[in-house]
Image (cartoon, rainbow, N blue to C red):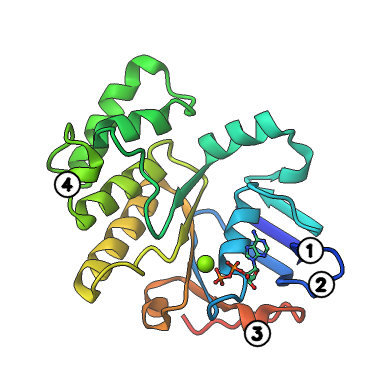
Amino acid sequence: MLEIRDLIHRYRPGEPPVLTLDDFRVDPGEQVVVTGKSGSGKSTLLHLSAGLMEPSRGGIRVDGVELRTLRAARRDRFRGRRIGMVFQTFHLLHGFSAKENILAALMFSDMPAAAHEKRADQLLGVLGIQRPNARVDTLSIGQQQRVAVARAVACSPALVLADEPTASLDPELARAALDLLQGACRSCGSALVCVTHDRSIVDRFDRHVDLASAAGSGGEHGDA
Ligand code: ADP
Ligand code: MG
């Protein structure tokens, strides 16, 4: 579902790379957690995997498509349709309701427009979003997290990328957020790559990759 080979990324030419990854694959429906300390390139890995920027070297395939071969507009559409993203601070469309945030994500889907309303209502129900028509900025953090997850899986993407999805939450909310995210990915058949500095959550995933040991050598370890 995600296939990365011989990846090197540097933000400035001549500087040492911020991310080196020889071989990283995620199977369809697989849930992988990637750990690394702050500055180890976790967010960079997700931005590259989402096609938000191009690697200095190497190939990235999502759902069988080499991202480099897509021009900007097609890549944006591909991302909207096949990749869901959950950010640490959610990045919801403020000033809009939970339902409107989900409908906006559905604009990229293959689903006919007439079916969007029903899909949005279904997600609002499944994810327990209690005030679907309230502006998202008036919702609690826990409720905003639910909207972010609903939006990420709205198009039943092949791949969901989550950047420190529990970092702003207390332990109880963090557990609930992961239950929600992992459950939603399972029911939509989406693979999940979750990056975090929090090693306490690694046991919940099918596989654990540590960036420090994966760098260069391609060495993964399966302690999940
Ligand atoms: P993490 O998410 O693991 O904390 P990042 O991927 O954000 O790590 O950053 C990896 C390294 O790349 C850091 O040294 C960071 O300062 C640098 N970096 C991140 N984004 C940029 C950018 N847009 N321009 C230049 N350097 C960046
Ligand atoms: Mg980061």
Check the image and report above or below for 122 versus 68.
Answer: above
Q: Between marks 2 and 3, how big is the CA–CA gap?
A: 21 Å
SS at badge 1: loop
Of tags 4 and 1, the one toward the viewer is 1
Which residue in the structure is indicated by mark 1?
Answer: 12
Which residue in the structure is indicated by mark 3?
Answer: 213
Q: What residue type is labelled 3?
A: Ser
Of tags 2 and 3, the one toward the viewer is 2
Q: What residue type is labelled 2?
A: Glu
Q: Between marks 2 and 1, how big is the CA–CA gap?
A: 6 Å
Which residue in the structure is indicated by mark 2?
Answer: 15
Decide: marks 2, 1 in contact (CB < 8 A)?
Answer: yes
The mark that comes first in sequence, 2 or 4, is: 2
Of tags 1 and 3, the one toward the viewer is 1
Which residue in the structure is indicated by mark 4?
Answer: 128
Whole-percent x, y for residue 177 in the image: 28, 62
Q: What residue type is labelled 4?
A: Gly
Check the image and report above or below for 223 versus 67.
Answer: below
Q: Between marks 4 and 3, how big is the CA–CA gap?
A: 39 Å
Front in this rendered view, residue 30 or 169: 169
Residue 53 falls left or right of residue 192: right
Q: Is mark 1 within 8 Å of ligand 1?
A: yes
Q: Between marks 1 and 3, how big is the CA–CA gap?
A: 24 Å
Other-residue count near label 3 (Cα within 10 Å), few / some / many at <14 / 14–19 / ≥20:
some
Q: Between marks 4 and 1, how big is the CA–CA gap?
A: 44 Å
Decide: marks 4, 3 in contact (CB < 8 A)?
Answer: no
Check the image and report above or below for 73 versus 6.
Answer: above
Of tags 2 and 4, the one toward the viewer is 2
Q: Which residue is drawn at 47% across and 28% down?
A: 109
